[in-house]
Amino acid sequence: MTAALPAIAFDRIGRDRLPALLRTMPKAELHIHIEGSLEPELIFKLAQRNGVALNYPSVEALRAAYAFTDLQSFLDIYYAGASVLLKEQDFFDMAWAYLTKARADNVVHTEMFFDPQGHTSRGVAFKTVLDGLTRAISDAGARLSVEARLIMCFLRHFDEADAERTLAAIEEFDVESSVMVPTHFVRCLALADDVRSRYDVSSLKCVVHTGGACPVAVKRSMLEWWGLVLYESYGGTESGSTCSIGPDEWLAHPGSVGRAVAPFEPLVVDEEGNPLPVNTEGRLYFRDL
């Protein structure tokens, strides 16, 4: 029998000791977009190796551009980094650089999001992306004692033809988990019945959808097609997930976004900020307990 760990009174720990404590504490990183982890030095190294011209004259200039001012300035850097990823070794080097840095911060488990469509649209084979990432994950487990998993993401601005290519990739590579938004569901459902039935998606175990409200009819159709694998996450960019709901509970309460997840508590108020009783419409807030 394993003894319970004692509670830590964080409020009694001196602020000067917290940085060292946080560095040594084992951690799980559950939301990292691996393409976004590329740093300027590696971007330039891969660009030179692959003969890719960058719009930045030096590593220093690229690093200075990391001072994002808006979404577009972030995307400029993101796509500049993605443009140098062409070969299996590139994807390995990217993932390995992140995993070694994560290990230095005592991360023992990480779940890495990756965007295959951002690469296949540039002519890079899905297998090239996957082989490089999975090789780095295997080496990290053996050499760094870091457990890592992949979560495949979809890009909402691609059309139905790309939705079919994604279904083919799910079947070919036995994809188990993914993150989507309702737009992806709509585009998949827009495919003809004979196209949808052509692909086996039974490998899917968990598909988290977020980023916007999902119409009840759309979600019900996806559950009928993919089975009880859809999990909804409701929240915001700054807070992360504040509510979640699984497929069984959603079928019992269609349209619901579920219950609040720790450490959040929902609060519904009127126009003056006064708390409202249960089952009353009002302004929805979440407070961090």
Image: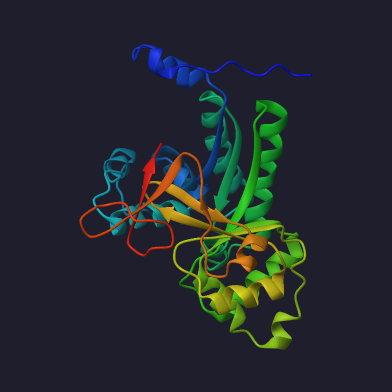
Q: Is residue 147 above or below residue 225?
A: above
**Residue 229, picture quadrant:** bottom right
Nearest the eye: 169 or 203: 203
Pick the front one: 185 or 218: 218
Quarter placement of the C terminus: top left
Q: Is residue 229 left or right of residue 239?
A: right
Residue 171 place in picture, x, y as percent = 75, 67
The image position of residue 256, as x and y in percent, is 52, 64
User: Is residue 88 in view?
Assistant: yes
Q: Is residue 233 above or below residue 184?
A: above
In this rendering, the count of numbered labels is: 0
Please say whether residue 162 is visible from this viewpoint: no
From the viewer's side, name the closer residue of 149 and 202. Answer: 202
- Farthest residue, direction left: 272
Residue ID at (77%, 71%): 200
Left/right of residue 8 with respect to residue 44 in the rendered view:
right
- At a point 31% along the width and 42% down the height, the residue shown is 58
Q: Give residue 201's quadrant in the image.
A: bottom right
Q: Is residue 143 above or below residue 215?
A: above
